[in-house]
Image (cartoon, grey):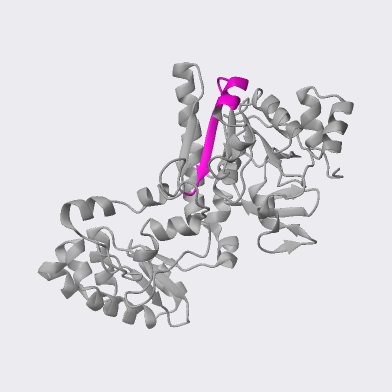
Amino acid sequence: MSTAAPAPAAAPGPLRGLRVLDLATLFAGPLAATLLGDFGAEVVKIEHPGRPDPSRGHGPAKDGIGLWWKLLGRNKRTMTLDLSTPGGRDTLLRLAGTADVVIENFRPGTLEKWGLGWPELSAANPRLVLARVTAFGQQGPYAGRPGFGTLAEAMSGFAAITGEPAGPPTLPPFGLADSIAALTCAYAVMTALAGRELTGHGQVVDLAIIEPILTVLGPHPLWYDQLGYVQPRTGNRSTNNAPRNTYRSADGRWLAVSTSAQSIAERVMRLVGRPELIAEPWFANGSGRAAHAHLLDEAVGDWIARHKAEEVVALFEDAEAAVALVYDVRDVMADPQFAALDTVTEVEDPELGPIRMQNVLFRLSETPGAIRWAGRPHGADTDAVLTELGLTRAEIDALRTEGAL
């Protein structure tokens, strides 16, 4: 039993009244539930009694409390339930009867093994939406394989085009595919709920993590289908425009320059003292400039290397050209633009006191989202949720004795 302060009452938000059961772990499914909770959905995080969500132990901790969980678990009530036990199964079906959405990421067949497949869940609640987030989807030759976002980053083609031309394929040092899948899952859930308004009944969302990242990569399949073109690794350069790279200033700071628009490319060349390049026939379009990236990189890089970073930014701004310092998290936390947007906001936490984390994803003028609380302790709301469900003290104690809680 947790000694943490009771969860605050749900704040108004556009998704108030929506109830979500989060059965998922690491990371796409739970993050999708977080995104829904940020805008008012009541999210109940259900974890195994003896095996909490692994995100509680991922990354650095303070005073034994995992910090990643504080972000991923925000705006969620937490309860424990062993779905493989008879009591756990029956309790989950009762909870599903009160919910709008269930999000899970077990390997295909696991819920079915426990008697919690779509037939049972939809019988308990015909209006339920079941979001199933797996590496490879619910069908196909790979459906039963274990998988994580790293495999999606490899199989989608992302790693193949990331890195230097002569170097190895490069994986991102964070959960890129999982995060893209989480955004997609939240969108899919809202789409399924809109469909429910048309049909009167719920449906299954089958989301394979290998797919959303492939969409984000753009027209690679189309290029290959029509032209046989396979994009190579180009490092920081683009095959579509130049100059586009990172460059080091006189005081050792790295800056990123982008010239996706023709007018910006021309302004940059005038700024760095090479206006004659604008008259070259190949300079008139992005692909032509990309073919001469070495020449353009040399011009921009040499100029930036003669100036301090602060001066580079000021002169680029005066020229209405696009530049940005390459930030690490220390810069993010100190940047005035992020501060103006409240991108990283302060949250009061009963366990750790004031903590800072990313704010909700976007601002709504009439029905804004909010961080009502950070991730709570394992099982903190178990008894409260079950009592609200109508279980008596004796029934809750019996579930705990069975090992279901």
In the image shown, does 102 or 182 lie closer to the viewer? 102
In the image shown, does 247 or 118 lie closer to the viewer? 118
User: Considering the image in quadrants, where does the C terminus appear?
Assistant: top right
> Does residue 68 appear to the left or right of 222 in the view shown?
right
Residue 302 position, x and y percent, is 32, 82
Residue at image position (44%, 55%) is 152
Magenta segment boundaries in residue numbering: 119-135
Asked whether residue 365 is in view, the answer is: no
In the image shown, does 221 or 288 lie closer to the viewer? 221
Residue 222 position, x and y percent, is 23, 50
Q: Is residue 280 above or below residue 18?
A: below
Residue at image position (49%, 44%) is 183
Residue that extends furthest to the left in the rendered view of this protein: 281
Disc count in the image? 0
Residue 164 position, x and y percent, is 36, 74
> Does residue 401 appear to the left or right of 288 in the view shown?
right
Quarter of image, res 79: top right
Residue 311 belongs to the span the image colors magenta = no
Residue 185 position, x and y percent, is 49, 40
User: Considering the image in quadrants, where does the N terminus appear?
Assistant: top right
Q: Is residue 347 above or below residue 174?
A: above
Asked whether residue 89 is in view, the answer is: yes
Residue at image position (72%, 49%) is 52
> Does residue 146 appear to the left or right of 169 in the view shown?
right
> Does residue 361 appear to the left or right of 56 in the view shown?
left
